[in-house]
Image (cartoon, rainbow, N blue to C red):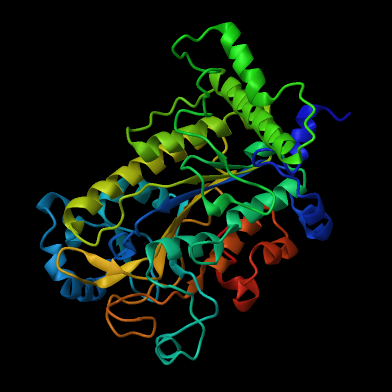
């Protein structure tokens, strides 16, 4: 039976739910996706560029002494209560070639997850076209991404493998594959952003379904009380917006009416679901990202009633451009993110889906190991966190260059040349999500330039 809701959900005109008929005919790989169970990905993107040198700190005495020597002008500015002195750090189990590492004490809630095996670190990830070293970078013997060290361009390159102006991201392309495999009864909610429109969740067919920390968008005059509003006015206004009963010869007007109808239907459906009992009882701390992640948790709680098997969420804490005032600003941001993410993980445990949801971090780029006075400058490679019950946690995957200047992965001033590409990072995450090798190569065109086994043990 073909009804209007099914048509809007599977047509290329619905809001964020286009089937892309021609695209699907050309992409038979999409039907290989494994969607038997429920899985969700949650990307936490640190806008402004997280200083991963200040997230994963050296802990063995030799490495710490090297780090302290380079960063002493900045370390001296930290308050005694939130010092980066070695005695205040939270040591992590495991080592790399005898070197040990630690979290800052603000990461206490995440330290617990690492120690219990539910959080992993992926070392020195960044956008690349092909593998690079200091020698090939300086000589120009290997290709490098365009517009390095630019915030907007590297945000886009992380999300879409191209500088600003890209139209699809790898998250959206993953969602395309899941939609083509008919993973979800309500396809509109396959890719959901709690942070506005983003190229990251834009696919060839799928567009991100944007919600706020309060839930589905509300329309003045229909869903909310406005001056002179009345039920009669609301009904008439909705008819006008929906273009109800019109038989328009103009295709553009018909397309617009279809998009508006789809939008109103999907917003109404999500609002209805969120109004029902079923929210996780876990207490979230206050704050912008906290409310975003709480909304993600509330949406995941409705996965069964919405008929969802695969979802991809996007959240963006900002404020990480710590080019100045780092010692004052970054510890506060770190304490916030640790509390927010831990509350989110606890809500997943409460719902019994901690093994079905993987949260991972991303950022514009890393920052320099060298300091500029009271901050650090734009970098390139950075270390990231991946957490969830399915993650092979309690260890560092990949490599972490030594805390010194001039090593083989130093592009200058401690700016890390990535040893793992975003493509490898994305492929490991996508494989867990259920994409086949063919789908991964379709969704990540540059993947063939890198060793797929590098993160084989992340899950």
Percent from the top left, x then y, of residue 59? 27, 66
**187 vs 301: above or below:** below
**168 vs 15: above or below:** below
Image mark count: 0
**459 vs 422: above or below:** above
Query: Nearest the camera: 384 or 178?
Result: 178
In the rendered image, which quarter contains the C terminus?
bottom right
Task: Classify residue 388 as left or right of residue 372.
Answer: right
Residue at 46% from the left image edge and 68% from the top image edge: 125
Percent from the top left, x then y, of residue 293? 45, 38
The reply to whether residue 308 is visible in this rendering is no
Task: Classify residue 78 as left or right of residue 236.
Answer: left
Give the quadrant of residue 38: top right
Query: Nearest the camera: 398 or 78?
Result: 78
Residue at 29% from the left image edge and 57% from the top image edge: 321
Task: Classify residue 381 as left or right of residue 404.
Answer: right
In the rendered image, which quarter contains the N terminus?
top right
Percent from the top left, x then y, of residue 162? 53, 67
Percent from the top left, x then y, of residue 442? 70, 64
Task: Classify residue 357 as left or right of residue 90.
Answer: right
Farthest residue to the front: give it.
Answer: 249
């Amino acid at each position: 039976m073909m009804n209007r809701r099914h048509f809007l959900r599977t047509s290329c005109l619905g809001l964020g739910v286009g089937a892309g008929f021609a695209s699907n005919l050309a992409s038979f790989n999409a039907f290989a996706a494994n969607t038997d169970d429920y899985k969700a990905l949650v990307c936490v993107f640190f806008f402004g560029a997280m200083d991963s040198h200040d997230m994963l700190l050296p802990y063995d005495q030799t490495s710490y002494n090297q780090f302290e020597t380079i960063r002493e002008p900045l370390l001296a500015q930290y308050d005694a209560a939130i010092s980066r002195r070695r005695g205040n750090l939270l040591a992590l189990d495991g080592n790399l070639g005898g070197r040990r590492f630690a979290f800052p004490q603000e990461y206490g809630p995440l330290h617990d997850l690492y120690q219990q095996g539910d959080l992993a670190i992926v070392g020195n990830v960044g956008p690349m076209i092909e593998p690079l070293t200091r020698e090939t970078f300086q000589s120009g013997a290997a290709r490098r991404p365009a517009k390095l060290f630019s915030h907007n361009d590297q945000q886009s390159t992380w999300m879409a493998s191209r500088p600003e102006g890209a139209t699809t991201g790898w998250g959206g392309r993953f969602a395309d594959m899941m939609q083509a495999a008919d993973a979800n009864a309500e396809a509109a909610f396959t890719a959901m952003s709690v942070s506005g429109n983003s190229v990251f969740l834009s696919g060839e067919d799928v567009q991100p379904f944007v919600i706020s920390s309060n839930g589905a968008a509300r329309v003045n005059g229909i869903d909310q009380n406005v001056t002179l509003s009345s039920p009669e006015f609301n009904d008439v206004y909705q008819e006008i917006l929906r273009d109800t009963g019109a038989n328009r010869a103009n295709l553009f007007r018909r397309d617009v009416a279809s998009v508006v109808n789809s939008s109103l239907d999907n917003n109404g459906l999500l609002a209805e679901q969120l109004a029902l009992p079923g929210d996780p009882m876990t207490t979230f701390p206050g704050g912008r990202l906290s409310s975003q992640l709480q909304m993600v948790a509330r949406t995941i709680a409705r996965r069964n009633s919405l008929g969802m098997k695969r979802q991809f969420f996007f959240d963006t804490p900002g404020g990480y451009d710590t080019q100045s005032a780092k010692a004052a600003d970054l510890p506060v941001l770190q304490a916030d993110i640790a509390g927010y993410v831990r509350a989110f993980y606890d809500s997943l445990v409460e719902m019994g889906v901690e093994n079905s949801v993987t949260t991972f971090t991303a950022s514009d780029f890393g920052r320099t190991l060298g300091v500029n006075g009271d901050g650090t400058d734009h970098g390139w490679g950075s270390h990231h966190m991946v957490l969830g019950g399915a993650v092979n946690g309690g260890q560092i995957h990949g490599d972490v260059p030594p805390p010194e200047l001039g090593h083989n992965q130093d592009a200058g001033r401690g700016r890390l040349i990535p040893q793992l590409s975003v493509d490898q990072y994305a492929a490991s995450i996508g494989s867990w999500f259920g994409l086949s090798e063919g789908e991964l190569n379709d969704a990540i065109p540059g993947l063939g330039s890198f060793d797929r086994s590098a993160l084989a043990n992340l899950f």
